[in-house]
Image (tube, grey):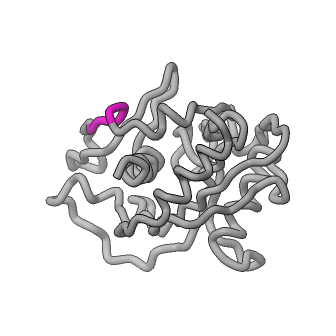
């Protein structure tokens, strides 16, 4: 897919009004904890040439979401200006993506995670050659998924699992051997819906 087409579609999608999302959205009966959410930023970076989205498989040793498929990113640190800065910093740390290669196209509404984060997805375009270099302490693997797979709402479905004694519904968008689920799939599904509005 041509880069201009991916860019144009993403920009058009970001113009469509959207509400914040939550890990609790698909389970209306779930008890939502009354906690102060910690701000975080994640980077949904699509390559300008291929349109492929960079994803990571988190290290099994991490405290939050071990072994899960995720967008590069993390909590906002004191030195970060905002969620965008956090997402770009984390992408450099996790997969070696130079922030100078990223054209930030816009932000999606924040997503509340079950782990107490208010996660802002930053939508960007990667310019120039880029080969992910996983940071061994945080990232078990870095890979990419075609734009067409992410953009097609038909690739998403809802499953359920027992979590902390309650059944919880969650979004998934599997790709080959990768089980993309939870907050990452929920955010990508919200983007797919806007790409097809």
At 58% from the left and 52% from the top, the residue drawn is 8
Question: Which region is colored magenta?
Answer: 154-158
- Depicted 82 relative to depicted 122: above or below: below
Residue 20: in sight, yes or no?
yes
Quadrant in which residue 85 is drawn = bottom right
Q: From the viewer's perspective, is 95 left or right of 105?
A: right
Residue 55: in sight, yes or no?
no
Q: From the viewer's perspective, is 44 left or right of 18?
A: right
Which of 52/93 is in front? Answer: 52
Which of 179/104 is in front? Answer: 104
Which of 61/107 is in front? Answer: 107
Question: Residue 82's x, y, as percent?
Answer: 66, 76
Quadrant in which residue 50 is drawn = top right
Residue 149, magenta (yes or no): no
* Number of marks: 0
Residue 157, magenta (yes or no): yes
Q: Quadrant of the N terminus?
A: top right
Question: Residue 55's x, y, as percent?
Answer: 61, 40
- Depicted 146 relative to depicted 45: above or below: above
Question: Residue 7's x, y, as percent?
Answer: 62, 51
Outermost residue, left side: 29
Question: Residue 23's x, y, as percent?
Answer: 35, 56
- Depicted 127 relative to depicted 87: above or below: above
Q: From the viewer's perspective, is 21 left or right of 93?
A: left
At 32% from the left and 77% from the top, the residue drawn is 34
At 51% from the left and 27% from the top, the residue drawn is 178
Q: From the viewer's perspective, is 13 left or right of 90?
A: left
Outermost residue, top side: 176
At 72% from the left and 57% from the top, the residue drawn is 90
């Amino acid at each position: 897919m041509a880069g201009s087409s991916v860019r144009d579609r993403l920009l058009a999608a970001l113009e469509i009004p959207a509400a914040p999302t939550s890990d609790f959205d698909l389970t209306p009966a779930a008890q939502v904890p009354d906690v102060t959410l910690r701000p975080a930023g994640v980077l949904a970076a699509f390559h300008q040439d291929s349109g492929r989205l960079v994803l990571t498989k988190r290290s099994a040793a991490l405290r939050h979401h071990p072994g899960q498929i995720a967008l590069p990113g993390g909590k906002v640190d004191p030195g970060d200006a905002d969620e965008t800065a956090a997402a770009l910093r984390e992408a450099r740390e996790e997969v070696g993506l130079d922030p100078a290669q990223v054209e930030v196209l816009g932000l999606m509404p924040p997503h509340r995670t079950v782990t107490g984060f208010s996660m802002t997805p930053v939508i960007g375009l990667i310019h120039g050659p880029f080969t992910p270099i996983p940071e061994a302490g945080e990232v078990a693997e870095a890979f990419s998924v075609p734009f067409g797979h992410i953009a097609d709402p038909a690739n998403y479905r809802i499953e359920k699992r027992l979590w902390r004694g309650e059944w919880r519904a969650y979004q998934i968008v599997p790709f080959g051997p990768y089980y993309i689920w939870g907050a990452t799939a929920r955010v990508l599904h919200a983007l797919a819906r806007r790409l097809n509005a």
